[in-house]
Image (cartoon, helix red, strand yellow):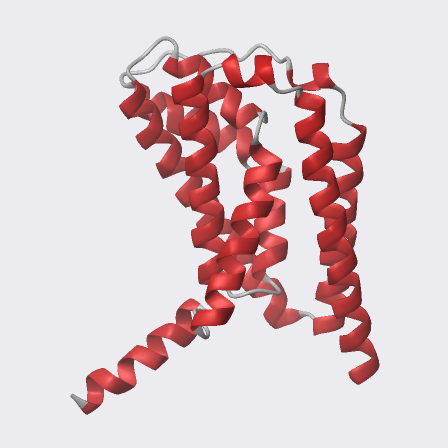
């Protein structure tokens, strides 16, 4: 019993779980950020296109597998950065990244996402979806945002929130199809996402200033 009791805190520290409040805050923040950034993005358009031609379940499972892998890589990289660099520098980099993402989203035009998604052949739609999304999203702003958040927030919470957000946006794309994008202007979604990124950039800049002055 004593060994089991001591193992749980050790496991929590390895996973970066932290307290329940910190975990919940990290999960909620990453969920809101990634959900706002991914509505109408190319990953959702890929799911829309594939689901219109194939059964939705394999598309959804392939998307979940791809996002779980990408978010895991992003969290590991973010934790590594946090352990190598001073806290104020990490927060400053996060602020710059979020500000750049926000400005890009605010300046995006409605026709920027009207890309024709080419469907690749494969033995199964699960594998096709997994490969398409992994290639399309690797190094994308969403993955970079997860890297940035993992360096300053509870990593396990960031992973959970980001994965749930990507699962939700994929499900919306699969179930609702293009009707959502026909009813809600895509440029409005970009502006909401951009404003959220800029707000987080301001908060990260404040964290960088506080860490620098206290250090």
Q: In which quarter of the image is residue 130?
A: top left
Which quadrant: the N terminus?
bottom left
Q: Count the labels in the image.
A: 0
Residue visible at 59% across and 53% down in the picture? 147
Residue 14 appears at what percent x and percent y? 41, 72
On-image quarter of the C terminus: bottom right
Q: Where is residue 31 in the image (x, y as percent from the top left)?
A: 52, 48
Is 140 displayed left or right of 135 in the figure?
Answer: right
Q: Quadrant of residue 171?
A: top left
Whole-percent x and y of residue 3? 21, 87
Please name whichever residue, 94 or 169, is drawn nearer the observer in this view of the structure: 169
Residue furthest to the front in view is 183
The residue drawn where x is 33% and y is 15% is 122
Image height of 204 relative to 212, above or below: above
User: What residue is shown at x 76% (from left), y 20% (from top)?
Assistant: 109
Q: Which of 195 and 41 is in front in this view?
A: 195
Q: Is residue 134 left or right of residue 207?
A: left
Residue 115, picture quadrant: top right
Q: In this view, does 204 lie above or below 185?
A: below
Determine whether 51 is above or below 65 in the image.
above
Q: Residue furthest left?
A: 1
| Residue 97 appears in the picture as rendered | no
Residue 54 visible in the displayed image: yes
Residue 169 screen position, x and y as percent = 48, 32
Q: In this view, does 58 lie above or below 204?
A: above
């Amino acid at each position: 019993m004593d060994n089991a009791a001591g193992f749980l805190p050790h496991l929590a520290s390895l996973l970066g779980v932290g307290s329940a409040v910190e975990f919940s805050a990290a999960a909620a923040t990453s969920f809101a950020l990634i959900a706002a950034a991914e509505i109408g993005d190319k990953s959702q358009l890929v799911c829309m296109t594939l689901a219109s031609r194939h059964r939705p379940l394999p598309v959804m499972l392939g998307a979940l597998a791809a996002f779980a892998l990408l978010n895991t890589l992003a969290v590991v990289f973010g934790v590594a950065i946090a352990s190598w660099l001073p806290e104020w520098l990490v927060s400053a980099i996060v602020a710059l990244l979020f500000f750049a993402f926000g400005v890009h989203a605010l300046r995006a035009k409605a026709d920027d996402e009207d890309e024709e998604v080419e469907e690749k052949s494969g033995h199964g739609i699960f594998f096709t979806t997994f490969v398409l999304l992994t290639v399309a999203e690797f190094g994308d702003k969403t993955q970079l945002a997860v890297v940035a958040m993992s360096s300053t927030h509870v990593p396990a919470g960031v992973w959970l929130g980001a994965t749930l957000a990507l699962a939700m946006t994929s499900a919306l794309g699969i179930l609702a199809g293009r009707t959502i994008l026909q009813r809600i202007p895509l440029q409005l979604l970009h502006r909401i996402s951009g404003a959220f990124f800029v707000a987080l950039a301001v908060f990260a800049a404040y964290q960088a200033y506080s860490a620098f002055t206290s250090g």
